[in-house]
Amino acid sequence: MVLIVMIWLLLLGIGVRYSKEMANVALSRENTTALRGICAVEIMIGHLGGATGSLVLYPNQKAGILFVGVFFAISGYGLMYSLSCKENYLDTFLKKRLSRLLIPAYSIFAVGILVCSYQEEKVEELWNLLSPERFFNGTNWFVWELAGMYLVFYLWARFCQNYEKGHWILLGLSILFTAIAYWLQLDNPWYGSTLCFWLGIVYYIKKDKFEQIFVCRRAFLKGTICTLSMMVSIGTFFCLGGVAGKLVARNAAALLFVMILLIALYRFKIGNRVSVWLGKYSQEIFLFHPLFIYWFRDWIVNDAVYCLAVMGATVLASVLYEICAGLPRSLLAFFRSQSTRGK
């Protein structure tokens, strides 16, 4: 287990570059893609820690909510960027976004059903884990929550007249959602990092002000303060329960973690070939790995071998799925080009 963590940290460290000149934006395309890859693998390692009970992987298991927060922040930033830069972006927004989110999720679910079809009890267990009937539980919570965020963003962007001030509406809705999710006693991930979606949107809208406050003036000091505050929030979560621990402290830790990343990314480029490559398959990695964690546990006894097998199979399946999913688009583009030539 220690070797797995050391190799992963080494892969993350390769290619990290410090720049004396401040970057134009923290969430550049390379950094964003790399972050997606890093977060997807970190979440997978965290789930492996839960499956094996490994103390070595325990920090990754508990840090999962922080990396989900990064996913949400990147999503919010990306939506706001596209809204500002693309004409008629909202016209096909729901169709494109929901299809890209839900079709892979339930295509992979269908693959799981087919693979487990030789054992009826396995199919039933898998269905209970991933089916829409388990809307408020199960491993697909992230898919459904992100789909809800897309819907709220669409309605907000369609009817909001002033984005500079209207983002407070999104903050209010996010707080309301976290309060309701906690009151309904949903699983912790449902309300642990929801506010980061709003933070990603606000960062795009208030990017200049963020730079002036956190980057141009004593960035190291303010980053240190955010780090210490995050550690206090994490300690509060471990020591206290209830609203202060589970609700407030978790969201505060996730928000502060994203803030620290944003401050750091003005000076550091984190993307390397491995993380950027993994980022291209981040959604598939997130969707596939619970299936392999579930399938492989019954017949791989050694925890280290089990973790390596799950990680390798997840990445391989993600690449193959992306190739298969892209094949119809490639064929359609080919036939269109041929028909254009004929004319």
Image (cartoon, rainbow, N blue to C red):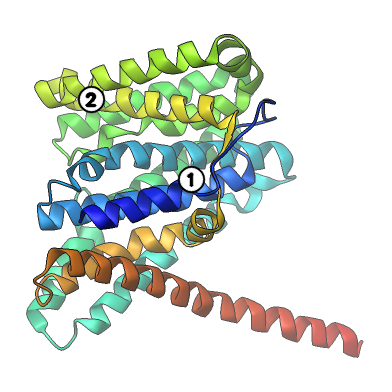
Instruction: Confirm or deny contact between disc 2 and disc 1 (CB under 8 A).
Output: no
Asked whether residue 169 is in view, the answer is: yes
Provide the residue designation for mark 2: 234
> What x and y, as percent, mark residue 331?
66, 84
In this image, 173 relative to 243: left or right? right
Q: Nearer the viewer, residue 70 or 339?
A: 70
> What x and y, as percent, mark residue 71?
43, 43
> What x and y, as percent, mark residue 41?
36, 54
> Can you say whether 60 is above or below 321 in the image?
above
Asked whether residue 138 is in view, the answer is: no
Q: Tell me the kind of residue under disc 1.
A: Leu
Q: Quadrant of residue 83?
A: top right
Provide the residue designation for mark 1: 35
* Label 1 neighbour load within 10 Å: few <14, some 14-19, many 20+: many
Q: Name the residue: 28% across, 50% down.
A: 141
Q: Name the residue: 14% across, 64% down.
A: 303
- Distance Cα–Cα, label 2 vs label 1: 22 Å
> What x and y, as percent, mark residue 285?
38, 62
> Can you say whether 52 is above or below 325 in the image?
above
* Label 2 neighbour load within 10 Å: few <14, some 14-19, many 20+: many
Quarter of the rendering occupied by the N terminus: bottom left
Q: Tell me the kind of residue under disc 2.
A: Ile
Q: Secondary structure at mark 1?
A: helix
Quarter of the rendering occupied by the C terminus: bottom right
Q: Name the residue: 45% across, 53% down.
A: 37
Q: Name the residue: 72% across, 45% down.
A: 86
